[in-house]
Amino acid sequence: MKVAVIVFPGSNCDQDTRWALERVGLKAELVWHTEGSLEGYGAVFLPGGFSYGDYLRAGALAKFSPVMGEVRRLAQQGYPVMGICNGFQVLTEAELLPGALLANTNLHYTCKEIFLRVERTDLPFTSDYRQAQVLRLPIAHGEGRYYADEETLARLEQNRQVVFRYVEHQGQGGNPNGSLGDIAGIVNERGNVLGMMPHPERAVESVLGSVDGEGIFTSLSKALATMA
């Protein structure tokens, strides 16, 4: 089953994402944002980068790309859809996920390794992780502070939609951007649309310093095998 990696003007993690998907045996194809059909694809990734230069707000223009109509269709039909970093921002702007990603509280672009805890393992993206497993992944963003109103935050917690949460580990890490609830990643109520700010595709080989991101892609590979 093919996986579409959407490429917007300014995406820069599309090749990394395709590489991570192909390492676990999935067939991944780059799809330009003007494409009007995603027929035949079993999952969609919105990669990191700076779609449309992040003008107005990060992800604010990408939501109008023609391909987003198809992303919405697949999401509504229950296909796995995942946004990483800028892709997470696009998913919130497109209202496929609640909340917004605001400027980091330090007002700086922050690029470093952080720790996050896996809060759910019953999703097509997380089944290969252990409950409460702590992962070490890189972040690279200036607008990664997750924000939502109190009612939305309460609903996210009640419905177990927080999938990843920033944590301290062995005296390091912690919340790097001021996200409410230490939120690093959330899923929609149905459980098929996931957004996260850290970059799992940059942590799939030991030479990169961590293989903790690989579970995202192996989990998805197993999930798609059951859907085929």
Image: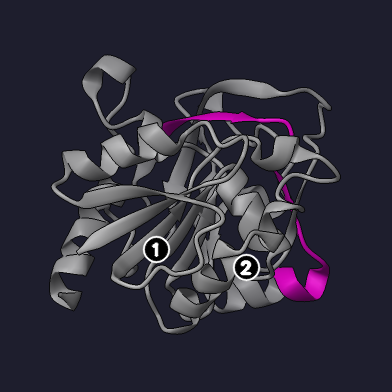
Give the magenta-colored segment's residue range: 135-153
Query: What is the distance, in whole Å, between disc 1 and disc 2 at their CAs?
Result: 17 Å
In the image, residue 141 lies in the stretch drawn in magenta: yes
Q: Position of residue 201 (x, y in %)?
A: 37, 36
Q: Position of residue 160 (x, y in %)?
A: 51, 72
Q: Residues within 10 Å of mark 2 (few under 14, many from 20)?
A: some
Q: Amino acid at mark 2?
A: Leu
Query: 14 left or right of 180?
Result: left
Q: Residues within 10 Å of mark 1 (few under 14, many from 20)?
A: many
- Determine the residue positioned at 45% across, 25% down: 170
Q: Which residue is mark 2?
A: 97
Position of the C terminus by quadrant: bottom left
Q: Is residue 150 above or below residue 114?
A: below
Q: Is residue 188 above or below residue 194?
A: below
Specify the farthest residue to the bottom. Answer: 77
Per the rendering, the mark at residue 120 is 1
Position of the N terminus by quadrant: bottom left
In the image, residue 168 lies in the stretch drawn in magenta: no
Q: Is residue 141 above or below residue 122?
A: above
- Determine the residue positioned at 37% across, 56% down: 4
Per the rendering, the mark at residue 62 is none
SS at circle 1: loop
Q: Position of residue 131 (x, y in %)?
A: 32, 57
Q: Nearer the viewer, residue 133 or 93?
A: 93
Q: Nearer the viewer, residue 225 or 37?
A: 37
